[in-house]
Image (tube, rainbow, N blue to C red):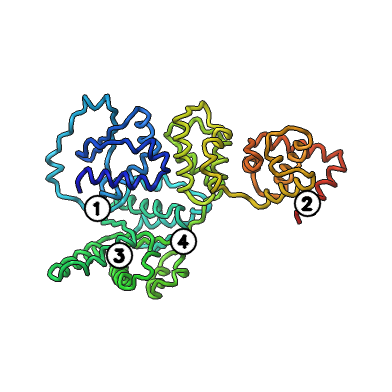
Amino acid sequence: MKTDELFSQFLNDIQGQVSQNAFTIWFSKLELLSIVNNVVTIKVPMEIHKQMLSETYNDIIDASFFSLTGVNYTFKYITEDEVETFTQPVVEEEKVNKEVEWNTNLNPKFTFDNYIVGNSNRLAFVAARAVAEAPGTIHNPLFIYGRSGLGKTHLMQAIGNYIHEHSDKKVLYTTSNEFMTEFTGIASVDKGNSINYANEFKNKYRNVDVLIIDDIQFLVGAERTQQEFFHTFNALHQANKQIIISSDKSPDDLKKIEERLRSRFMWGLPVDIYPPDFNLRCEIIKAKVKNTSIETKLTDDAIEYIANSCVNDVRHIEGTINRLLAYSAMMVPDKITLDFANEALKDYVTTNIFINNSIASIQNAVAAYFKISVEDLKSKRRTNSVVRPRHIAMYLCREETDENLAKIGLEFGGRDHSTVSTAIDKIKEELETNENLQNCLNDIKKTLQ
């Protein structure tokens, strides 16, 4: 593939992964200068582009080039002023003449060390480590399932990278779509070459020590490909080769996959990954901002705000952090507080934020009791006719739900946890002497029931 064509495909790929605004600001004016000796040199408009591309967007840039080429590159960014002193690198002859080594298709950035473990993925992590340390002898196959964006691919590739680094075993990572595309390609080759192509296909997938295949659910409906994978599975398993599979469903729920395949998926260990809980989301956020420009600026309130806003998957967390990094690069705050994070992410997380029905119900009940609107409770108004109901609503949210102070504050106009704590303490103190307040709370609780 020509370098210009490769760079065009790269930009198209990035455009599908970031917002249009982010693409216009950070990617639309990039120019490829060279790709030599596994170094990609790119001209950028300004110095700030260097920082954003190397810190905020480095992972998706790296992953995009890897997906297009199967090669890991180093990226160098230079400005217009630096182009004058830029010298085209000389191709190293030994690299040109060197025989291409076996391509594992693994991304070296996916390791056990940077996989954040919590209650929702601990069993899968322990099983993955056991397989990595003794491939082919335990949990074979290892079947990891869970919905998209929870870290299945990271964990699978961490196994592959560990085995590749600590042994001479032949590891191959692929997806079910790639497997199907290569297999169906046999029929498109002319008859004279189809036998050779079929043999190459079988050698590739059956002469490995570890086969890692992602998103097996996409084999649904592809009967001939399922048959081929069945034979590949049997050949590897009988030779005590390790097989690692992922899916968005458990083996029992893959109803349109052949029964004989589903039964084999159960031979080893099926293990699921759940969406991360609040504490794990906080740890993931801290890990994702490590070694970035906002690592020391991000307050605990802001971390909790992001964790409460991104409850579905890790990819949503990553997108939110990228948005915050870009906004921070432009505004350059001393600290990233809850208010700053709320402002930076207001157009990004509002449509995705998890709204607890109990909080909404309490707000509606309190507003109806005091004959005000829910918007009054969330507003900045400080009249007694609004402040007191607001304090009561916050108190009930803390008492009647499992939400933390940061989440409650978020639902009351983005107030910080200390404001919520103060309001709750006031109501608790008043309850000791004010019987009317207790009656008020009881009446509101009855409407909730």
Query: Local crowd at mark 2 within 10 Å, few (<14), some, or many (≥20)?
Result: some
Q: CA separation, marks 3 and 2?
A: 58 Å
Identity, as a three-letter code, of the amino acid under mark 3 = Met
Query: Local crowd at mark 1 within 10 Å, few (<14), some, or many (≥20)?
Result: few
Q: In this view, does 351 lie to the left or right of 158?
A: right
Identity, as a three-letter code, of the amino acid under mark 4 = Val
Q: Which of 449 and 296 is in front in this view?
A: 449
Sequence-wise first label, 4 or 2: 4
Sequence-wise first label, 3 or 1: 1
Q: Do the residues labelled 1 and 2 touch (CB within 8 Å)?
A: no
The residue labelled by disc 1 is 103
Labels 3, 1: front one: 3
Q: In this view, does 392 lie to the left or right of 98?
A: right
Q: What element carries label 1?
A: loop
The residue labelled by disc 2 is 445
Q: Above or below — where is 20 with respect to 205?
A: above
* Residue 352 pos. (x, y %): 54, 48
Q: Is mark 4 on a helix, strand or loop?
A: strand
Q: CA separation, marks 1 and 4?
A: 28 Å
Q: Above or below — where is 435 with respect to 78?
A: below
Q: Is mark 3 on a helix, strand or loop?
A: helix
The residue labelled by disc 4 is 271
The residue labelled by disc 3 is 180
